[in-house]
Structure formats: C-alpha cells, structure tokens
Image (spheres, grey):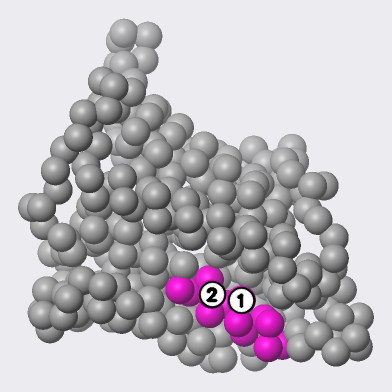
C-alpha cells in the first residue's frame, strides 16, 4: 500500500508535467528536451524567493510560475520558433544544447546541495496501512484540479476547439482567421507554467537536485508516447501508470529472493518508450482524440 501511495504522489508530479507537454507535442510536434531543466528552475526560483528573499509562500509560488512562463517564452522565441518552421526535428538539437546550458546555470547559482521549499513541517497521516503527509494530500488535490481544468479547456471551450483545429491542419486554421502562431506561443508558455508547477510540487514534497532533470524529461515523453500524440488524458493516465510501476519495480521483494536496485527505476520509462515505438507508435489512445 505504501508503494501505491508513493506512486500516486510521483504520478501526480509526472502527470502535471506530461499534461502540458502533451499540448505542445500534439500541436507542434516539437521535442523539448530542456523540459526537466524548466521544471527545476521553477522549483529553484520558488525556493529562492521563499528561503532567501523571505517572501510569503503564495507570493513565492506565484513568482516561480511567472518565472516558468517567462523562461518558456524566451525558449520559444530563441530556441524553438526559428527552427521548427524549417524542420520540426531541429528543436531536438537546440533544446539539448539549451538543457546543457541550463544545467550549468543551475549548478552555478544553486550548487549541488539539495534544496527543500518547506522543510520539516509535514504531518504524517495514517492511510490504510500506509503513511501520507498533509502537504502531499494538498499537492495531489491541487494537481487533480489543475489537470481537470486543462482537460476541460482543451475539450469543451472555444479556445480548445481552435487548438484542435490548429492540430489537425495549421494552414486551414490560419485561413479561417485562427491565429496559429500566437496559439503556438501561448501553448508553449502554458507548458512552461505547468513545468514550473511541477518543480514547485517537487520542491515542496521532496528535494530539488540538478540530477533530476533528465529522468523527469524521459518520464514525461514516455507518458505522451504511450498515451498518443496530443491526447491529454492518455498522457495523464500513463504518467500515473509509469510512476506506480517505478515504485513497484524497486520496492517489491521479487519471488522472495532479491530486490531490484533503485538505480534501475528510471529504466521503466525507457522500456515504455521502446515498447510503444516498436508495437504501437501512435500510442494507445491515438484514435480517441476529439476533432474540432
């Protein structure tokens, strides 16, 4: 039961990141391999505002979200938009370079020491045969609300209909007066804000360390590949499935003989990517994406 609770917590973080990424990947088809670094910067900025500057927690969280939005705007204008119009795979190279730059910047500004936004105030609450903190309950609930709002916006609003139209045929949508370039930029900013929210989630629940960037990026892409291009609900579902399997793989005593080392935990997401690219490259729910 404790492993399942841990998987629910880790899955909420992964779903928050993958949900925003599913929008960008579904509309632009862009691979942003600096996603993990964007997550960490949102968390680190919040930590800095709260611990070093001394602002209140709500103001610090707002500052971290704004920083994520501004950073994503800069990344889109400099590293994505000039290149994906030439070929959609070019941002794969530019965001790899950006990720290396951001890794060095994070190490320079915040060092390797783990940082926690809310150290030592968590109260453990018994849940069946497991333990969960009051802070984790709040994080799970807030994440669920954010994901429901995202899905509601995409599937029921006029803006969501325009986004689906841009996904299906950008040129036709532009001819009908839908500002596709502006929507592309707005989607990328929204994805950056959700990534920053994921970093704040991580900083409150656990610790922020520079080595977490790449595993978070791989897990998010595994979720959207398994769920289907542009399918938000599929990405969210597989984010939870991958996170729970990661906990079970390294937490169970297999056949009563051995434990799998914790270092192999990240391989679960890689195996999902390999399996779906080989046998179901369109994702499990690719046919269920709504049309405009």
Q: Residue at x 49, y 41 (%)?
A: 240
For disc 2, the neighbor class at 10 Å (few under 14, some 14 to 19, many from 20) is: many
- The answer to whether residue 277 is visible is no
Q: Which residue is mark 1?
A: 187
195 on left or right of 60: right
Residue 92 versus residue 134 in the image, above or below: below
Q: Residue at x 38, y 76 (%)?
A: 65
In the image, the segment drawn in magenta is: 181-193
Q: Residue at x 38, y 29 (%)?
A: 4
Dominant SS type (magenta) = helix
Residue 123 versus residue 187 in the image, above or below: above
Q: Quadrant of the N terminus?
A: top left
Q: How many marks?
A: 2
- The answer to whether residue 224 is visible is yes
Secondary element at tag 1: helix
Residue found at the very far top of the displayed protein: 256
For disc 1, the neighbor class at 10 Å (few under 14, some 14 to 19, many from 20) is: many
Q: Residue at x 31, y 8 (%)?
A: 256
Q: What is the x, y in percent for residue 167?
A: 78, 69
72 on left or right of 257: right
Q: Which residue is mark 2?
A: 190
């Amino acid at each position: 039961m404790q492993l399942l609770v841990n998987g629910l917590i880790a899955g909420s973080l992964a779903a928050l990141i993958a949900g925003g990424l599913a929008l960008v990947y579904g509309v632009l088809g862009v691979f942003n391999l600096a996603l993990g670094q964007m997550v960490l910067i949102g968390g680190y900025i919040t930590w800095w505002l709260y611990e070093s500057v001394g602002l209140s927690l709500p103001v610090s969280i707002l500052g971290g979200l704004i920083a994520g939005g501004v950073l994503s705007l800069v990344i889109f204008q400099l590293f994505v938009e000039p290149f994906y119009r030439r070929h959609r795979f070019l941002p794969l190279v530019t965001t790899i370079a950006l990720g290396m730059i951001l890794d060095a910047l994070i190490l320079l500004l915040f060092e390797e020491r783990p940082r926690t936004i809310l150290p030592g105030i968590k109260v453990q609450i018994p849940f069946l045969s497991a333990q969960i903190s009051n802070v984790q309950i709040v994080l799970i609930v807030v994440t669920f609300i954010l994901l429901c709002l995202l899905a509601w916006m995409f599937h029921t609003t006029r803006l969501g209909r325009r986004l689906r139209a841009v996904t299906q045929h950008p040129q036709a949508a532009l001819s009908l007066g839908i500002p596709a370039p502006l929507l592309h930029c707005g989607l990328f900013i929204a994805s950056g804000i959700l990534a920053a929210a994921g970093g704040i989630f991580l900083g409150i629940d656990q610790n922020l360390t520079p080595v977490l960037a790449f595993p978070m990026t791989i897990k998010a892409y595994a979720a959207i590949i398994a769920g289907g291009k542009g399918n938000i609900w599929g990405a969210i579902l597989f984010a939870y499935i991958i996170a729970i399997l990661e906990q079970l793989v390294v937490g169970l005593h297999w056949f009563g003989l051995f434990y799998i080392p914790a270092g192999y935990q990240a391989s679960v997401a890689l195996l999902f990517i390999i399996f779906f690219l080989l046998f179901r490259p369109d994702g499990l729910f690719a046919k269920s994406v709504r049309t405009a």
